[in-house]
Image: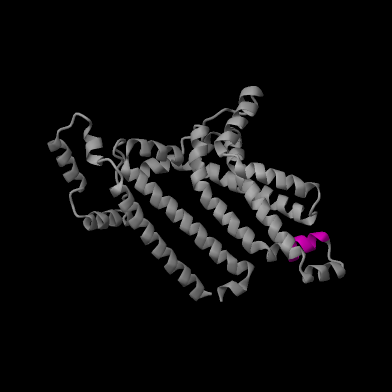
Amino acid sequence: MTAYVLRRLVSTIAVMAMVGIFVFLLLRMAPGDPAAIIAGKSATAEMVGRIREQMGLNDPLLIQFWRWVRNMIGGDFGTSIFAGRPVLELISQRLEPTLSLSILTMILSVTVGVSFGILAAWRTGGLVDRLLTIFSAVGYSVPIFVIGFFLIYFFAILTHWLPVQGYVPIHTGLGPWFVHLVLPTVALGLGYIAFIARVTRASMVEVLSEDYIRTAAAKGASPYAMLFHHALKNAGVPILTVIGISFAYMIGGVVLTETVFNIPGIGRLVVDAINNRDYPIIQSVLILTSGLYVLINLTVDLAYTLIDPRIRY
């Protein structure tokens, strides 16, 4: 077990090193000079050169990369070009809305998706199974912004049941906080519900056809015991994999959802940074989200050993 964990940790460090090199070179090769953007359109070549010198852009790439990595390890992710404030401070201010939306969406997706998939597998060919097929086709193919605009039109504009957009911090009250996140959570979660439900259904159908399930039924095991004690655990590896993938992919979906519902989260911060060519923010968010993605994959890999101990070998 220890050797398995060490191998996964070493591979994780190697992946993050490659991500760091890629992010650093990607923005260095992107069009546009950060110094010229900071100086403005009316700046002279001398002013641009002086700003480049202050930012260290005239140094060799290796020196720039080493300085960038060293600062990040020390907790210094740089200063925003346009806001003039530390990047980590800007990210921390936008973290609560993004975390709230992501966690609520994941809870909704896993709870509904796994439950829907189990019911569809238990009654293959029945009403629930046919409904799941239709829902999966619609939920996984319709873009998030289309679902979001439809929800806004029906539940906010026509019926006035829910707020159109915006975010209320959790410290102001759980009620207003939750109400403002209902529509974006549903809009972001429908596709992941469909994805998780389809994989859960397929995995459960395969396991329920095994001989040991028929043996358990012949011995008088209850449907609950067969589904959750015998079948679900043995079907857990594909389900856990797709849950991890969904949570990782959700990072991109949050950007679009926050834009549609005007939520001041990290997604909106990234969009503004891209429009303004604010390289420190873009680099920092890319590194942090990549680290989260790798951490999720590492957690899923380690969780495999709890479901199936043979994987550690």
> Could you tell me if residue 167 is visible in this image?
no
Going 87% across and 67% down the picture, which residue do you hit?
A: 220
| Residue 55, x across and y down, in percent | 21, 45
Please name whichever residue, 26 or 119, is drawn nearer the observer in this view of the structure.
26
Question: Position of 27 compared to 61: left or right?
Answer: right
Question: Position of 112 compared to 12: left or right?
Answer: right
Question: Position of 153 compared to 130: left or right?
Answer: left
Going 75% across and 52% down the picture, which residue do you hit?
A: 120
Residue 306, picture quadrant: bottom right
* Magenta stretch secondary structure, dominant: helix
Please name whichever residue, 140 or 11, is drawn nearer the observer in this view of the structure.
140
Q: How did the renderer colour the structure?
A: one colour
Residue 276, picture quadrant: top left
| Residue 159, x across and y down, in percent | 66, 24
| Residue 46, x across and y down, in percent | 12, 37
Question: Which residue is the extreme one toward the left?
Answer: 46
Total number of numbered discs in the rendering: 0
Going 76% across and 47% down the picture, which residue do you hit?
A: 130
Is residue 114 located in the magenta-colored stretch of the structure?
no
Is residue 224 located in the magenta-colored stretch of the structure?
yes
The quarter of the image holding the C terminus is bottom right
Residue 308 higher or lower than 57, as above or below: below
| Residue 264, x across and y down, in percent | 46, 35
Going 35% across and 52% down the picture, which residue do you hit?
A: 23
The boundaries of the magenta stretch are: 223-230
